[in-house]
Image (spheres, helix red, strand yellow):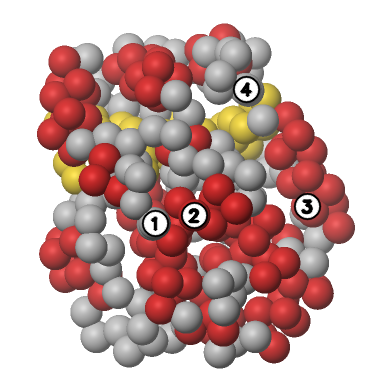
Amino acid sequence: MNNPEGSLTSLGAAGLRAAHQLLDGEPKLFSDPVILRLLDPGHIEEIKARASQFQHPETLRLRSRIALRSRYAEDRLMLAYARGVRQYLLLGAGLDTFAWRQPEGLDELKIFEADHPATQEQKRQRLSRAGLSVPANCQIVAINFETETLEEALRKSSFDFHAPCFISWLGVTVYLSKDAVDTVFRFVSTLPKGSELVFTFAQERLAGSMNYTAARAAGAGEPWVTYFRPEDLSRRLYELGFSAVHFLEPEEARKTYYINRHDGLTSPSLASIASAIV
């Protein structure tokens, strides 16, 4: 079957995070019980009914990458909080659920979810149906990355430009122009020392290939347009003034997150997640 997710394709990463909760072994690579409340009951039943199709090798690999990127970002967030960072900005938040499952010990954290207004409205509707409200420490920030700068959007919120911030930017850069991506990099580089950006990217060697994930996105009407070489990314980030740049390499991911897993989830074959500290 070319598209094991069927009608779940439109839910993107959220549908695969839900499948991870329902189908994969314990401990979860990434625990997200709230996503099961945001999806329609029909989607949940579809995942259960088509469990064998979700074991398709390409779907397993994609599901693993989706879970890994969220786990890695939130692990880095915890380290940032420990060193004094008290702001968390999610760029392209989508159906991310961190604000609704905040772990203990982050009492001073302020959360800012930035995304396209249409996406935010869909999320509000799902939250309402699930009986969930936006937490007091979370603000919704509307932005169109291609027409508005991140700084302009954040000026409309209570974001503190004089305090360090942790930023997660997952599953977004592939859909933007390189100029739009660079604009975000430049903005983050102006934030106070200790700020950190965790983001995903597609390696240039995948451009023009029959990559399953890229083909899946194109089939949904959202083709990948931007690719990078890690060495070019690293050089650019250091040019902008970042003090440390780290790529989560496959072997590091395997040793950190995949030891003793028996559910078919495997570490990625290429680095696609990076951390940059101001």
Q: Amino acid at mark 2?
A: Ala
Residue at mark 2: 215
Q: Which dot marks residue 127?
A: 3
Name the foreground residue: 134 vs 84.
134
The secondary element bearing badge 2 is classed as helix
Label located before the other in sequence (2 or 3) = 3
Q: Amino acid at mark 1?
A: Met
Name the foreground residue: 199 vs 81.
199
What separation in Å lies between label 2 and label 3 (alpha carbons)? 30 Å
Q: Is residue 131 visible?
A: no
Q: Residue at x 49, y 54 (%)?
A: 215
Name the foreground residue: 223 vs 62.
223
Q: Is the Cβ of the residue at disc 1 closer than 8 Å to that at disc 4?
A: no
Residue at mark 1: 210
Residue at mark 4: 144
Label located before the other in sequence (1 or 4) = 4
Label located before the other in sequence (2 or 1) = 1
The secondary element bearing badge 1 is classed as loop
Q: Is the Cβ of the residue at disc 2 closer than 8 Å to that at disc 1?
A: yes
